[in-house]
Amino acid sequence: MVAPSPRRTLVVVVCAALATGAVGWIVGTQVRSPADAAAEHRAPSPSLVTAPVLRKALTSTVVIQGTVAYSAATPLALNGVVGSPGESSEKAQLITKAPSAGGTVKAGDVLLEVSGRPVFVLPGEVPMYRTLTPGSKGDDVKQLQAALVALGHASGLRSGTFDNATATAVGKLYARAGYEEQKPTAEQRRQLRTLEQAVDDAKAALDAVPPDADRGRAHRAHNDAKAELNTFRASYGTSVPSGEVLFLPRLPVRLDAVTAKAGAAASGQIGTVTDPTVHVQGAVPTLDARLLRAGLSATLLATDGTEVPATLDTLGGDTQSAASTAFRIVPKDQAALAPFAGQAVRVTVQVGATEGEVLVVPVAAVITGADGRTRVRVVSAEQVVRDVSVRTGLTAFGEVHVTPLEGVLAQGDRVLVGGS
């Protein structure tokens, strides 16, 4: 056996030493002391939570739900008869032209037609309870005159007496609608001729009495005939039958529903009317209602995304309770909202707004110190914190308008949030 040479032995020893050292180094890099392990798992130093100072317009709103609706429906009924009382009693009063639901009826319109005669709608509080003839007096005549003046058929009519000027204006009302006013009937004309003849006959009888005879009876007969003729003439002429005018307290109105049909008897209720303007109604929690007042601007959002500007018209009323308060909102564009009648809409009422763009910070960034002063804490890029005294203004959606009182605060600064 040949003994290893000294050089080979040296190489083997060196390689063994190197291998041992490498293993030791590897093991050493993987082994940590308890202190090193704790240091590696220690939480990092806390950082400051900040938010930027913004400059923008701030608006505060109350969002509620409402329903698009017309006003409460009012029954509409026919009263009296059309045409001459003598003629109408001889034949049935039938509807010859019925109205259509959904339309708007204004002063002077013909609502429907009965036995070929028009039924006008005019403004007034006193119902049409009688036929108005020449010589008629009263509040019903006065409101008829006011309506005729408003429609431009006359001027200065206010006496409350149905006179020749009133009869002329009535004729214009009918002519504009394509009808003839109610004039004396054939029977009335015959009666007039009969009374006129009676006066002539009485006068002839008086003239035939000899001068030296007693003329008293003939005089009385002549006077009675003239008085009867004058009485008849006082109510003879153009008239307004009780069934040819419907006075309504408010016009125009929307014909909400119609129950009358052509060919049906003209009596009783013929439908219902409502105010022709739509509005949004509903109730708002009383806590939110304290922020609202009549006249505030609102935006209505329909189901299809249509937005309609509106105004808060009334707040409260008979339906107010401890939990909720009724409201009524009127759109600025009736035509835009009318298609959504009966549907729900979202209502956003603007309860406050800044005058243009202002400095705004999160509400959580505002703190009140022990001295009672309100401030924000501005954090610099070097994490240096300084206090700025501020006055707060409008708050909306978690942000608040601030005005610096002491110290500098500008757009882009970062303020500390949620801590002091």
Image: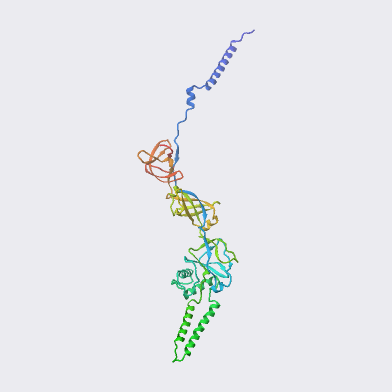
Instruction: Choose between 190 and 148: the one closer to the eye.
Output: 190
Question: How many labels were placed on the picture?
Answer: 0
240 sits to left or right of 413: right
Relative to 205, say whether 191 is above or below: above
Residue name at image x 51 percent, y 62 percent: 253
| Residue 15 image offset from top left, x and y in percent | 57, 16
| Residue 110 image offset from top left, x and y in percent | 54, 67
Instruction: Choose between 167 and 128: the one closer to the eye.
Output: 128
Instruction: Choose between 167 and 404: the one closer to the eye.
Output: 167
* Residue 58 shows up from this direction: no
Instruction: Name which quarter of the figure residue 416 lies in.
Output: top left
* Residue 334 shows up from this direction: yes
104 sits to left or right of 57: right
Residue name at image x 49 percent, y 85 percent: 202
Residue name at image x 53 percent, y 78 percent: 188
* Residue at the left extreme, as displayed: 371
| Residue 80 image offset from top left, x and y in percent | 53, 68
Q: Quarter of the image containing the N terminus?
A: top right
Give the colouring mode of the picture. rainbow
Relative to 9, say whether 156 is above or below: below
| Residue 336 image offset from top left, x and y in percent | 53, 56
Instruction: Choose between 251 and 258: the one closer to the eye.
Output: 258
Relative to 373, say whether 222 is above or below: below
Q: Quarter of the image containing the C terminus?
A: top left
* Residue at the top extreme, as displayed: 1
